[in-house]
Image (cartoon, rainbow, N blue to C red):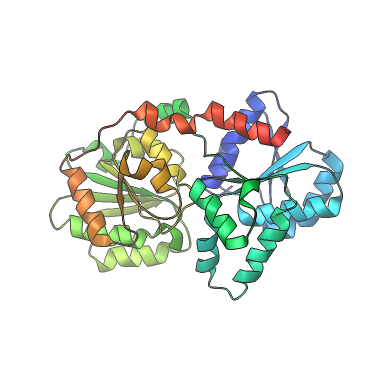
Amino acid sequence: MDGGGAERVMMLLAKEFSYRGHEVDLIVARAVGPYLKQMPPNVRLVDLKSTKPLTAIPALIRYLRKERPSSVLSSLFNANIALLIAKKISGIPVRCVVREANTISYDLRVSRSISAPITAGVIRRCYAWADVVVSLSYGAADDLTATTRFPRNKIKVIYNPIDIKMIHKKANEESTHPWLIDRDIPTILGIGRFCEQKDFSTLIRAFSIVVKYKNAKLIILGDGELRSQLEALVHALNLSDKVELPGFIDNPYQYLSRSSVFVLSSRWEGLGNVLIEALACDVPIIATNCPCGPGEVLQNGKYGRLVPVGDTQALSSEILRVIDDDILRFNKTEALSRFDINNITERFIEVLSN
């Protein structure tokens, strides 16, 4: 239960299913991570006590044979494969819905593995055992078919849900961060795992251009394997007094609601759930027009500015525009209607039931 977007969505869906009267187990390979503190009261946590999803397959087989659930929803590639193999071996006729949370071609490309074609074949073969494959965006669904030759007509697109009332409640909690209290100095915000996908190095380099023209601050919430490289880059650019990397934060919404601009600098996404949360917090948005998701969430620039991937100059220019109050105006209710938690939850219940 690390602090990623997929984990947050699964936690939210588990809560919503239980609110609607369903018995819900939340199954994890290992019961570790910050989201454990947010476990819904009516959801049972099942810890398979394994190092990772694929080594949890024997324990998952035992779970299926003992509990015989009516349906199982999984998310993230390794968990999806683990579930489908466990179903096949167990012989239990459980309905399996797998949620592919990213853009497969880029995940395989960044692995730089000679086994990438084999992995694509494994996806095509194993995903055929699923009753439904869910993709987060139309672009990611098309990419899944193009990369693995999995039939496009067997993929359903269901956007991520957000709990707007919960977000507004947490956004209104008092902030103690001095940069967010002093609103005279613009604060740029990034959120995500410190990994190659999120490309925070481009955001930091763009910010180094911004501060040549404006007194500003940058906060990047999250953690991950590239923390030391990002800290070294901040130091090399002499930005240590203007950039903070505070780690995982239980309530990112108080940061979103008080920032001058939210920036998503990713090289690729499945959808970009944090963009939806930023819309709910009514903060100006700048995002890379990466595959796949930001263009769909922001309606090709209607609800936020889009810049090319990895373009520090374009990103810095857009940040400066927003700081100078060149802000897009739009109907927030209209922008968020596609991600309504009630509609999205019912769509998941439908694919888990039929």
In the image: residue 220, left or right of residue 66: left
Residue at 25% over, 59% down: 206
Kindly give the residue lying farthest to the left in the view shown: 213
Left or right relative to 310: residue 117: right
Quadrant containing the C terminus is: top right
Q: Is residue 49 visible?
A: no
Q: Is residue 348 visible?
A: yes
Rendered image quadrant of residue 347:
top right
Residue 105 location (% of width, % of height) = 53, 62
Identify which residue is drawn at 66% across, 59% down.
Answer: 123
Q: Position of residue 132 (x, y in %)?
A: 68, 44
Q: Nearer the viewer, residue 37 or 258?
A: 258
Q: How many dots with numbers?
A: 0
Residue 19 higher or lower than 127, as above or below: above
**Is residue 339 positioned above or below 231 on the image?**
above
Q: Position of residue 259 (x, y in %)?
A: 29, 40
Q: Is residue 146 above or below residue 337?
A: below
For this rendering, which residue is in front, 198 or 232? 198
Q: Is residue 173 left or right of residue 73?
A: left
- Measured as percent of width and height from the top left, residue 192 is found at 43, 51
**Splitting the image into 4 quarters, where does residue 333 fall?**
top left
Quadrant for residue 245, please give it.
bottom left
> Which residue occupies 53% across, 56% down?
143
